Amino acid sequence: MLDRYWFGDVDRISPEAPVPIVKVGRVDERPGGAANVARNVSSLGAHSALLSVIGTDEPGEILERLVAADGVVATLHRDASISTTVKLRVVARQQQLLRIDFEKPPSKEVLADKLVDYQNLLGACDVVLLSDYGKGGLAHIGRMIELARSAGRRVLVDPKGEDYSRYKGATIVTPNRAELRAVVGRWGNERELEAKAQALRRELGLEALLLTRSEEGMTLFKEGGVVHQMASAREVFDVSGAGDTVIAAVGVMMACGVSLERAMEVANVAAGIVVGKLGTATVGLEELREALV
């Protein structure tokens, strides 16, 4: 998807309705969704191959150009029946006033064709990251996980929705608190949370479940125990795209052969950096190294 920002100033209220009038002074466009995951992988010094679906429209052309500029090798299937997903945010005085979404699910034919490219890309990848934004692009996610696991690849999923059975067989799933709560229900304490998270992990056959907890840090649920990492003490400016940075950082670390605990530690620091930036953003390798010292 394409994240589009309109920055401006507000000096008065509209006479037509009780809403602010924004005088737009600057427009910014950035890769969003899975494209933001891919550019975060690239910014951390790893090779990134992006597979997705876009429309035959201007936002699609912009998205294709932006990911290429970020060093991402993209295979983008074009579907004339849809518009490229766009999230338009209106920002004034560093505050988001409004977000407008443009989206439509891709056709089944395009998604089926995408599986062929997916199989071809598997041989060149160490880790597979599946970023589920509920936009219809991962209709065949069960088959994608199966193909990756058969090829000996570890699979990380950033989940969406209430049905996690579609992620069965993945290596790691990385929900945030609200996403996990929608699946397992509320918990009253850490012991209850652990019981629910571990039950879900076993049900799905996961190696681990990584729960991102905003200001509470991250918790890794795996066979044999739980590991918690406190959040980095940084000022939070914008949390949009933080989950993209987390799954990208964990994936890169796993591809380098480090432990899940160390991968979580690095991802936690990377997320702490990115929430201090406006909008969907990336973390550079040197920036991360300095923060880890």
Image: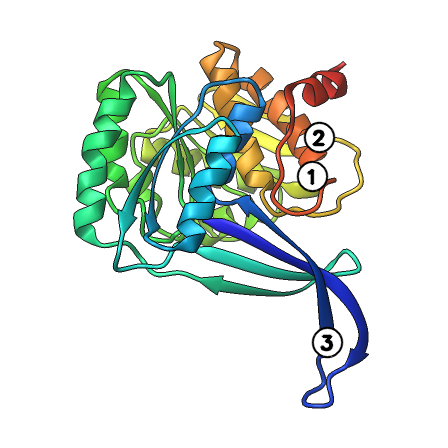
Reading the image, the residue beneath label 1 is 216
Look at the numbered discs 2 and 1 and tell me whether their residues touch, using CB distance below 8 Å: yes
Q: Looking at the rendering, which quadrant does residue 90 occupy?
A: bottom right
Q: Secondary structure at mark 1?
A: helix
Q: Looking at the rendering, which quadrant does residue 205 occupy?
A: top left
Reading the image, the residue beneath label 3 is 21
Q: Quadrant of the C terminus?
A: top right
- Marks 3 and 1, the one that precedes in the sequence: 3
- The answer to whether residue 160 of the structure is visible from this angle is no
**Which of these two is toward me, 2 or 240?**
2
The disc placed on residue 230 is: 2
Q: Secondary structure at mark 3?
A: strand
Amino acid found under the numbered disc labelled 3: Ile
Q: Nearer the viewer, mark 2 or mark 3?
A: 3
Left/right of residue 9 with respect to residue 86 in the rendered view: right
Q: Secondary structure at mark 2?
A: loop
The answer to whether 159 is drawn above or below residue 5 in the figure is above
Q: Nearer the viewer, mark 3 or mark 1?
A: 3
Q: Quick one: label 2, few (<14), some, or many (20+) residues within 10 Å?
A: some
| Residue at screen point 22% across, 45% down | 111
**Which of these two is toward me, 83 or 144?**
83
- Marks 2 and 1, the one that precedes in the sequence: 1
